[in-house]
């Protein structure tokens, strides 16, 4: 048994999670238990646990992962302020008179919310509360409605910015560097979050197109499943559509544009997104419209001007022109601060900042606790010889690199039925990714392929998180069986998306190559 202790350890982790223990405690508890068991059996050096402090320090000082709470806060503010609700209502009335129109509107809103929030739970819950009852009233098959809502909500994991892509960028960059060290390279390349965001754009939009094509075709072939809504619902005016669509689009352009354009790091762009979300929430809550719009314009102008003509006010040899520019920058910054304070004040009465801060703390704590526990698990797993076993299994797969990748993708898909994307990303991928990269697979393409696979984990029964999110808010007439049956066609579309990316790798590699 001692020779297979690493495999038993992995099985014990699955059992612990399936028994309902909190995930991070299950991971850390299994790691400690098997560390001492391995030490008692003489197959592990217990002093390896001394490296855990270094891993904790490395995680807490990781500049990339700082973006996670900021992006989570941005999404929480947009969800709590009712912006998602306005989007769904307006887009539903715009497309609702088409067959499958409500489904089309849900997918489009899901894509917009994905690019501006990146939080699956918030998106699924919002659409489950708002869109699903409207679909059922219009006569939609409960399975179809539930499947569309669940699937559209998961777009937040593949369309940047998303927490999955940030975690995956960190994991794959470390794996890429490890692979280069093993190849004997000591001047190594690194991968950035911006590269992964750029690589995910094409596949993410391709998935949106696949969903829309499926809904349109199903609406034609089985019109009773997705009838149009009532004709007496007022169609929104162009001004109304623009008023709800333009602000999120501008926020998306500010965040992703600054990252992909090389103007800001992901952490800086996440801070921009958080401030932008607060300003949008202030407008939605009835704040001082002139001040908020003026402050938003001032902040945008400040970002452009300070980039074109930077001024360091702490220097003593400034020229008159620099002093004037510095004074102007201070004025613009002050106007921006006043706008943010005004937005916070107007949103305060609706408790938007309170709820958003609470959601951010819960989500961020869960993610970082899982990453910390997974660091301990992987340390013990490597100490028990698990890393060598994984490399041996992958290298012995028939079919060479292709067979190893197919095996890894199948394993990730299977584990996705039981584990969350964070656990898979930080426990399994650091073990398999370096071996796959050494076999010749492009790390960016591999990362996005795995990202789509991990996105599917939100939909796969019995423990897909989107299924549980929707189950918690769905009307009584929607059963768990309806939800499970509804997501099956979309799981098939996810697999089609992975095959498409496999056959056309340029979907993921072309944009990063052009930008970086």
Image: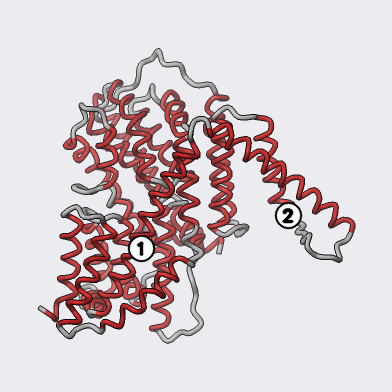
- Residue that carries the numbered disc 1 in the rendered image: 371
Q: CA distance from mark 2 to mark 1?
A: 37 Å
The disc at residue 392 is: none
The image shows residue 229, relative to residue 294, as above or below, that is above
Task: Decide which of 458, 230 is in the foreground and name it.
Answer: 458
Task: Decide which of 213, 271 is in the foreground and name it.
Answer: 271
Q: How many marks?
A: 2
Residue at image coords 52%, 27%: 241
Can residue 499 be seen? no
- Residue that carries the numbered disc 2 in the rendered image: 306
The image shows residue 515, relative to residue 357, as above or below, that is below
Can residue 207 be seen? yes
Q: Quadrant of the C terminus?
A: bottom right
Residue 416 screen position, x and y as percent: 25, 55
Residue at image coords 39%, 43%: 208
Q: Quadrant of residue 337?
A: top right
| Kind of element beneath mark 1 | helix
CA neighbours of label 2 inside 10 A, class few (<14), some (14 to 19), many (20+): few
In the image, 482: left or right of 495? left
The furthest residue to the top: 232
Residue 386 screen position, x and y as percent: 23, 76
CA neighbours of label 1 inside 10 A, class few (<14), some (14 to 19), many (20+): many
Residue 179 screen position, x and y as percent: 39, 78
Q: Quadrant of the N terminus?
A: bottom left
- Look at discs 2 and 1 and give the one toward the viewer: 1
Task: Decide which of 174, 200 is in the foreground and name it.
Answer: 174
Counting residues from the N terminus, which is met first, the one under dot 2 or under dot 1?
2
The furthest residue to the left: 1
Residue 451 screen position, x and y as percent: 36, 57
């Amino acid at each position: 048994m001692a020779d297979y202790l690493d495999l038993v350890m992995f099985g014990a982790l699955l059992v612990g999670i399936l028994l309902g223990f909190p995930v991070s405690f299950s991971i850390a508890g299994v790691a400690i238990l098997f560390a001492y068991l391995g030490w008692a059996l003489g197959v592990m050096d217990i002093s390896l646990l001394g490296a855990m402090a270094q891993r904790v320090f490395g995680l807490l000082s990781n500049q990339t992962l700082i973006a996670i709470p900021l992006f989570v806060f941005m999404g929480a503010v947009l969800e709590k302020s009712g912006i998602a609700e306005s989007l769904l209502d307006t887009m539903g009335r715009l497309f609702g008179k088409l067959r499958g129109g409500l489904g089309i509107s849900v997918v489009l809103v899901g894509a917009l919310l994905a690019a501006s929030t990146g939080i699956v739970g918030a998106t699924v819950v919002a659409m489950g509360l708002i869109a699903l009852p409207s679909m059922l009233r219009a006569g939609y098959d409960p399975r179809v409605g539930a499947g569309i809502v669940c699937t559209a909500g998961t777009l937040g994991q593949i369309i940047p910015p998303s927490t999955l892509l940030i975690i995956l960028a960190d994991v794959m960059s470390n794996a890429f560097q490890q692979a280069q060290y093993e190849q004997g390279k000591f001047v190594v390349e690194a991968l950035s979050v911006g590269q992964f965001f750029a690589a995910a754009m094409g596949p993410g939009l391709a998935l949106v197109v696949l969903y829309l094509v499926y809904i349109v075709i199903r609406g034609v072939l089985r019109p009773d499943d997705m009838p149009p809504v009532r004709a007496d619902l007022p169609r929104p005016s162009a001004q109304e559509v623009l008023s709800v669509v333009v602000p999120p689009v501008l926020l998306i352009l500010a965040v992703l544009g600054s990252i992909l354009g090389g103007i800001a790091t992901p952490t800086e762009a996440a801070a921009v997104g958080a401030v932008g979300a607060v300003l949008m929430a202030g407008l939605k809550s009835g704040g001082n419209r002139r001040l908020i719009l003026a402050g938003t314009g001032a902040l945008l102008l400040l970002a452009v001007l300070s980039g074109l003509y930077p001024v360091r006010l702490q220097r003593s040899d400034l020229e008159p022109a620099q002093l004037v520019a510095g004074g102007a920058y201070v004025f613009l910054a002050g106007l921006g601060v006043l706008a943010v304070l005004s937005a916070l004040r107007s949103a305060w009465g609706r408790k938007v900042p309170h709820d958003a801060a609470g959601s951010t703390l819960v989500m961020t704590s869960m993610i970082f606790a899982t990453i910390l526990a997974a660091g301990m698990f992987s340390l013990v797993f490597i100490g028990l010889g698990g890393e060598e076993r994984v490399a041996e299994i992958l290298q012995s797969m028939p079919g060479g690199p292709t067979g190893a990748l197919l095996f890894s993708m199948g394993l990730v898909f299977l584990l996705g039925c039981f584990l969350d994307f964070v656990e898979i990303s930080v426990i399994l991928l650091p073990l398999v990714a370096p071996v796959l990269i050494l076999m010749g697979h492009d790390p960016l393409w591999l990362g996005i392929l795995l990202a789509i696979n991990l996105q599917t984990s939100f939909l796969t029964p019995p423990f897909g998180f989107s299924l549980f999110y929707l189950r918690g808010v769905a009307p009584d007439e929607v059963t768990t069986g309806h939800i499970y049956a509804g997501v099956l066609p979309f799981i098939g579309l996810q697999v089609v998306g992975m095959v498409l990316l496999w056959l056309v790798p340029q979907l993921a590699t072309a944009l990063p190559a052009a930008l970086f």
